[in-house]
Image (tube, grey):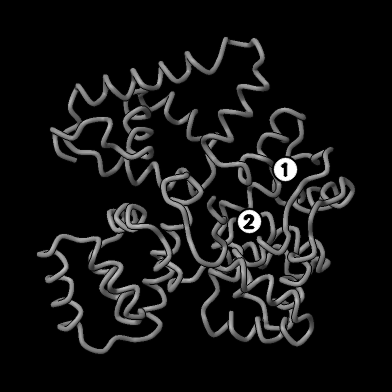
């Protein structure tokens, strides 16, 4: 990071990294304990990449933090409202919902939360012999990319059953969640959540499908279509695929490309439609676009699996940025704008 980069130009993750570095090891560790694995990874990478942080940047970040806290809290007065607003602003409504319930209602899903820190294969092994509904609850609770990897460790029949169950989930009864936590407590610590929790649904199934390998996704979608054509159409309508990036506005594409390495971008565009390529070219300087075209021509044949992996990596960035409110995704899964 260059010395002349001001705090106003820093991303939210960069600001969080600077704030944590300023707190010191002990206090920073306490803060990180309250973040999920994905958030820890993103902030950790940003912290590791920090070089030559200017004193003025630290002052601006700290000043902005104090100002935000001063505006939003009165140290205990109306703290519930403050917590709700803070978490919703930071994580978005969907992600903040369950966390708000656990904090304000005194519940705990530490057994479920612990799964988010495990390798997908290990999670699959934990739930492999559990009731299919328990498997569906776990898969619905995980982040979509991790859930997709967990599903990859089951055979097609089990995957189909789990995705169908995830699609039909809306809320989970307290007894079911208590049973799940009791199962997990045999290996982890935690207690049961006493509130009905919202999770699953068609949108969640679509998010998970987005992260599956294309061959697995195609086979699974064909099977869902045979069983329930309406459901398959709902899932497809909510899925956001690489081609849908053509519908993202120019500012969003520019923000996304700042997060993606040139190597990944070249690989992803090797298998992309012309509309996507032109969308990318038009949002680069003339010189940068020419260099990218040259790189694409010089790349030569590449494996389809490598192209798909690069495209999924870019989509992962896109979804995270959308959840953070940094870009708006168009196409399938995007909200209508008025």
Residue at (42, 28) in percent of width and height: 28
- Residue 137 percent location from the top left of the image: 75, 58
Q: In the rendered view, does 142 fall on the left or right side of 273?
A: right
Who is closer to the viewer here, 57 or 287?
Answer: 287
Distance Cα–Cα, label 1 vs label 2: 12 Å
Residue at (40, 22) in percent of width and height: 65
Q: Quadrant of the N terminus?
A: top left
Q: Mark 1 and mark 2 in contact? Answer it, CB < 8 Å.
A: no
Callout 2 secondary element: loop
Q: Is residue 90 above or below residue 286?
A: above
In the rendered image, which residue does mark 2 sit on? 142
Which label belongs to residue 317?
none
In the rendered image, which residue does mark 1 sit on? 109
- Residue 45 percent location from the top left of the image: 34, 46
- Residue 221 percent location from the top left of the image: 65, 81
- Residue 309 percent location from the top left of the image: 40, 74
Q: In the rendered view, does 144 fall on the left or right side of 62?
A: right
């Amino acid at each position: 990071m260059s010395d002349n980069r001001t705090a106003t130009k820093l991303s939210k993750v960069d600001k969080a990294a600077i704030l944590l570095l300023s707190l010191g090891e002990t206090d920073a560790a306490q803060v990180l304990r309250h973040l999920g694995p994905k958030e820890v990874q993103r902030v950790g990478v940003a912290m590791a990449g920090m070089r030559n942080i200017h004193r003025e940047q630290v002052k601006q970040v700290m000043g902005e933090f104090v100002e935000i806290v001063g505006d939003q809290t009165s140290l205990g007065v109306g703290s519930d409202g403050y917590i709700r607003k803070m978490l919703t602003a930071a994580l978005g409504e969907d992600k903040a919902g369950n966390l708000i319930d656990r904090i304000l209602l005194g519940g705990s899903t530490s057994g479920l939360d612990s799964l988010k820190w495990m390798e997908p294969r290990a999670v699959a092994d934990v739930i492999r012999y559990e009731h299919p509904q328990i498997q569906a609850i776990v898969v619905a609770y995980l982040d979509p990319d991790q859930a997709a990897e967990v599903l990859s460790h089951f055979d097609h029949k089990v995957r189909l059953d789990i995705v169908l169950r995830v699609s039909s989930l809306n809320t989970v009864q307290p007894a079911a969640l208590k049973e799940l936590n009791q199962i997990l407590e045999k290996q982890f610590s935690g207690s049961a959540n006493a509130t009905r929790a919202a999770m699953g649904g068609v949108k969640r199934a679509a998010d998970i499908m987005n992260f599956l390998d294309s061959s697995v996704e195609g086979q699974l979608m064909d099977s869902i279509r045979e069983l329930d054509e309406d459901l398959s159409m709902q899932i497809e309508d909510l899925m956001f695929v690489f081609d849908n990036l053509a519908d993202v506005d120019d500012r969003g594409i520019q923000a996304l490309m700042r997060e993606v390495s040139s190597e990944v971008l070249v690989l992803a565009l090797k298998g992309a439609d012309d509309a996507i390529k032109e969308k990318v070219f038009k949002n680069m300087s003339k010189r940068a676009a020419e260099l990218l075209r040259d790189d694409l021509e010089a790349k030569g044949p590449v494996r389809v699996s490598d192209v798909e992996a690069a495209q999924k990596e870019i989509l992962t960035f896109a979804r995270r940025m959308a959840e953070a409110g940094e870009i708006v995704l168009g196409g399938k899964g995007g909200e209508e704008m008025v």
